[in-house]
Image (cartoon, rainbow, N blue to C red):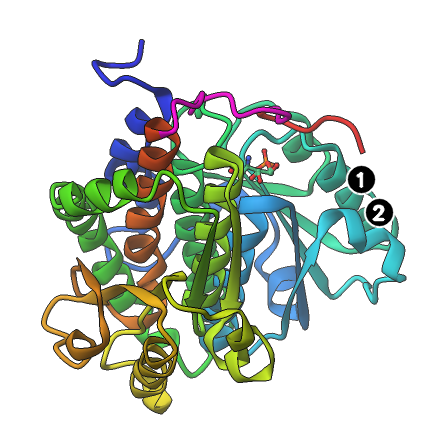
Amino acid sequence: EKGGYDTFMEKEINEQPQAVGDTLLGRTDESGALSLDELRIPEEKLRQVDRITIVACGTAAYAGMVAKYAIEHWTRIPVEVALAHEFRYCDPIVDERTLVVSISQSGETMDTLMAVKHARDLGALTISICNTHGSTIPRESDAVLYTHAGPEIAVASTKAFLAQITACYVLGLYLAQLRGGVHADNAGQVMSELHEVPGKIDQLLHTMGRVREIARFMADTRSVLFLGRQVGFPVAMEGALKLKELAYIHAEGFAAGELKHGPIALIEPGQPVFIVVPGPDTPHGLHGKVVSNIQEIRARGARTLVIAEEGDEAVVPFADEVIRVPHTSPLLQPLLTVVPLQVFALELSTAKGLDVDQPRNLAKSVTVE
Ligand code: M6R
């Protein structure tokens, strides 16, 4: 049942090209335009949406944070991401023109379910992005956009995360197309770039030898920091979450720009820091800014583990290790940059002799509030 792999998690990491590919499948018509008939929400209603709130927990919430950057850019609709368990208690601003998008692998997470019910009570339109057919959250929502990652057994979410991000991109591009925003014309181009991603993940998965080695050397590490910027920020937090839940190591993800506002005080000689570097073509010179951050922490003795695009030579002088990912456009990068962080956590957990698929104190779906 583990398909020749030692753990479900390893199997599921290796199924990620297919999870992304299958989630894209059937979501465009012959002309290449996005068509989401499965939503069964009148287009008119979707055109009226003037605010989007994403509700989710854990890894699914990080998928939501990635989605915020992409959906706002493509649609110019303001997107807020709320942890589902906080949503009901912050007197949320929601009305009939609010689209509440829940993201859940299991479709049974109680916190997320209660947030969806609350949103519906307030009159919002609700769409569930979900991986489990017939589960509760899709049933309680106006519409569902399924991720087609296949069953995810390991407690740590991997392929569902990539499928969730993919589904969010599809939804964002669909809304952009529907509303004829500035980026509507680009939707086809982004879709064709997305179709290239599964092959790139596959390629990346074949180059993880060094990441595994680094993880094994770090079995005694007590703390690891993760930095990222823009869409790399949620990736940094996801990398930290994977390490906490699988290897029981203290880990924190930061927005790279926050460093000088406090976290840089944590840097002491030997402190391992992963840095998720935006591609050199990311707007607003973000690449150079993150390279400066690497330089700053290296000067203070950090051990810099840099995730950068192939061909990005600017990072080399400041990196103790460079982990290469294939090129893709800036907003799509999380589908690639998170993969080495998943493999790192898996391998470190294995090196410590821990139960990869069933970490202590955790359940696959959290069905209590
Ligand atoms: O089933 P869901 O997607 O609603 O679950 C949400 C979180 O509980 C889940 O992503 C959790 O954070 C994972 N164990 C992370 O790997």
Disc 1 target residue: 114
Q: Residue at x 53, y 69 (%)?
A: 266
Residue furthest to the front in view is 269
Magenta stretch: dominant secondary structure: loop
Q: For mark 2, give the secondary structure.
A: helix
Which is more toward the observer, 356 or 206? 356
Residues under numbered marks 2 and 1 in contact, where contact means CB atoms less than 8 Å apart: yes
Q: For mark 1, give the secondary structure.
A: helix
Disc 2 target residue: 118
Which is more toward the observer, 241 or 230? 241
Q: Residue at x 31, y 73 (%)?
A: 278
Which amino acid, by three-letter code, is at mark 2? His
Quarter of the picture for ligand 1?
Answer: top right
Is 356 contained in the magenta span?
A: yes
Residue 359 drawn above or below residue 74 = above
Left/right placement of residue 128 relative to residue 211 reads: right
Magenta part of the protein: which range?
Answer: 352-363
Q: Is mark 2 within 8 Å of ligand 1?
A: no
Residue 257 drawn above or below residue 152 = below
**Count of marks, rendered view:** 2
Residue 105 drawn above or below residue 318 = above
Q: Position of residue 59 (x, y in %)?
A: 53, 45
